[in-house]
Image (spheres, grey):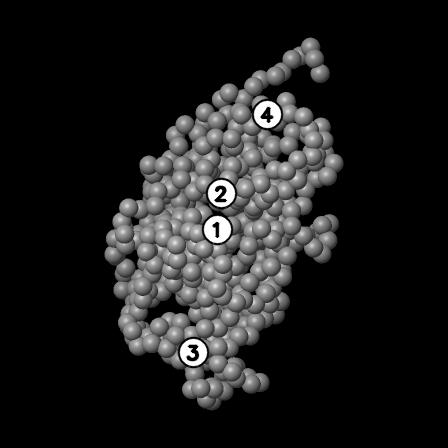
């Protein structure tokens, strides 16, 4: 698997970036001169309302060969069976408090499934039309997108590759992302996905309102967890073609397609703070207990999309990276709990320390709000009998969690999926009962 990234990036999170593929393509001293350099057109992409506070305002100015408005009308996209939705109600989804696990999702046998056609929704909450809620998707693909661009009008997406690298072309420039990296592409940004090393599989977290940001560090201080300097944003690179392209737009959970006679990636220069970015999970600086007890998993939050309720998230992206465990007289695996958040977990590679069997790379689990869960029987038995010495945990492993304040509903595709593990409940049935009223 190729892991060498062929592209250059600008570093930082939430910065105001400037990039130009031709010298002096960015206008001087203003955004919309009467005539832009090189005969380009100015076009603004807004990620927030014009009048939000300056600290929250997100927008980017493009300087492009064709205004993106030059296209034919959108029509419903009906090629194949697309499995995405935008409203999570009783008509389209079903709820369950049962612990659910899926074995690795199958990569299609067909030789012509690209990123768009390989999208399937697992579940979610809310309604894209009301800009309230989130969705969780799985993607699988066997071929690159050819003369096609994808644009999501419903929200921001956080992509977690599990199998295969993604070579992503965006209006801002190219991004190369490999397993153990993530990429965030925000609402309204057009992109295409090429597959440099064959079939791919991965996970997507979509939020309908707000944007991902770095979590507050509080008593941790100024450094730690995901540091701003490790996020990477592309540099400008443009195409000037007269080929026919399809632009596929996800709008209220439906797909629409429009055609145009030029590449959507004709941006010669841009500046702004609304841009896609990638992050290598190996850069995460883990924080944990160095004395006793198991720290809450919130210390592993990498990105968060905040809700209107302080301290509560529309969605958190949480990872469980390789690290040392040193807590003494402590049950070290994740403790048993019932949570007021919904937890969807996936595994990129390795073996998650809380599950000895059945939780596999490319698979997933869902523990609904207030549904009990925790380590499986084999993990418990080892944890209560082992000698507690400082040791490494999760080497060669990368598990992650999408956590949300919303109660998630599942799609029929997820409920009936052939990879659903109906024996998941067996993971806890053999937990040893060690109660003895005569012995403390």
Q: Residues within 10 Å of mark 1 (few under 14, many from 20)?
A: many
Residue 382 tag number? 4
Q: Nearer the viewer, mark 3 or mark 1?
A: 1
Between residues 107 and 439, which one lies in front from this camera angle? 107
Q: Are marks 3 and 1 in contact (CB under 8 Å)?
A: no
What residue is rendered at 47% in x and 89% in y?
A: 34
Q: Nearer the viewer, mark 2 or mark 3?
A: 2
What residue is rendered at 45% in x and 32% in y?
A: 358
Residue tagged by mark 1? Answer: 179
Q: Nearer the viewer, mark 3 or mark 4?
A: 4
Residue 349 tag number? 2
Relative image position of residue 340 (x, y in whole percent): 56, 39
Question: Residue 41, can we see it?
Answer: yes
Relative image position of residue 226 (x, y in whole percent): 62, 54
Name which of mark 3 and mark 1 comes first in the sequence: 3
Q: Residues within 10 Å of mark 2 (few under 14, many from 20)?
A: some
Name which of mark 4 and mark 1 comes first in the sequence: 1
State the CA–CA distance, disc 4 to disc 1. 30 Å
Residue 23 tag number? none
Relative image position of residue 332 (x, y in whole percent): 64, 32
């Amino acid at each position: 698997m190729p892991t060498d990234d062929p592209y250059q990036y600008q570093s930082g999170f939430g910065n105001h970036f400037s990039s130009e593929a031709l010298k002096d393509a960015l206008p001087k001293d203003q955004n919309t001169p009467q005539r832009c350099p090189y005969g380009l057109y100015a076009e603004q992409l807004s990620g927030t309302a014009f009048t939000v506070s300056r600290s929250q305002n997100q927008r980017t100015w493009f300087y492009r060969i064709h205004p993106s408005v030059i296209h034919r009308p959108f029509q419903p996209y009906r090629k194949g069976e697309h499995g995405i939705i935008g409203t999570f109600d009783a008509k389209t989804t079903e709820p369950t408090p049962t612990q659910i696990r899926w074995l690795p999702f199958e990569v299609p046998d067909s030789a012509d499934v690209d990123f768009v056609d390989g999208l399937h929704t697992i579940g979610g909450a809310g309604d894209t039309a009301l800009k309230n809620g989130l969705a969780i998707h799985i993607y699988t693909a066997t071929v690159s997108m050819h003369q096609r661009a994808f644009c999501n009008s419903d929200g921001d997406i956080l992509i977690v590759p599990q199998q295969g690298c993604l070579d992503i072309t965006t209006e801002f420039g190219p991004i190369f992302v490999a397993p153990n990296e993530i990429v965030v592409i925000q609402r309204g940004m057009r992109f295409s996905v090429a597959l440099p090393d064959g079939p791919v599989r991965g996970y997507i977290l979509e939020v309908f309102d707000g944007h991902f940001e770095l979590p507050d560090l509080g008593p941790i201080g100024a450094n730690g967890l995901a540091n701003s300097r490790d996020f990477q944003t592309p540099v400008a690179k443009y195409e000037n073609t007269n080929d026919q392209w399809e632009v596929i737009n996800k709008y209220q959970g439906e797909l629409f397609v429009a055609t145009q006679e030029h590449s959507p990636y004709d941006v010669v220069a841009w500046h702004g703070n609304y841009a896609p970015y990638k992050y290598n999970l190996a850069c995460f600086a883990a924080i944990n207990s160095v004395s006793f007890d198991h720290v809450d998993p919130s210390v592993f939050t990498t990105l968060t999309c905040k809700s209107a309720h302080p301290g509560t998230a529309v969605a958190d992206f949480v990872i469980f990276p390789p690290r040392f465990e040193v807590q003494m007289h402590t049950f070290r695996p994740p403790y048993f709990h019932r949570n007021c958040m919904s937890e969807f977990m996936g595994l990129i590679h390795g073996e998650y320390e809380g599950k000895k069997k059945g939780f596999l790379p490319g698979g997933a689990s869902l523990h609904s709000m207030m549904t009990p869960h925790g380590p499986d029987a084999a993990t418990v038995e080892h944890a209560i009998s082992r000698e507690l010495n400082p040791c490494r945990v999760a080497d060669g492993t990368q598990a992650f969690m999408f956590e949300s304040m919303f109660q998630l509903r599942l799609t029929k595709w997820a409920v009936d999926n052939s990879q659903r593990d109906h024996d998941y409940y067996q993971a806890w049935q053999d937990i040893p009962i060690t109660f003895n009223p005569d012995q403390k």
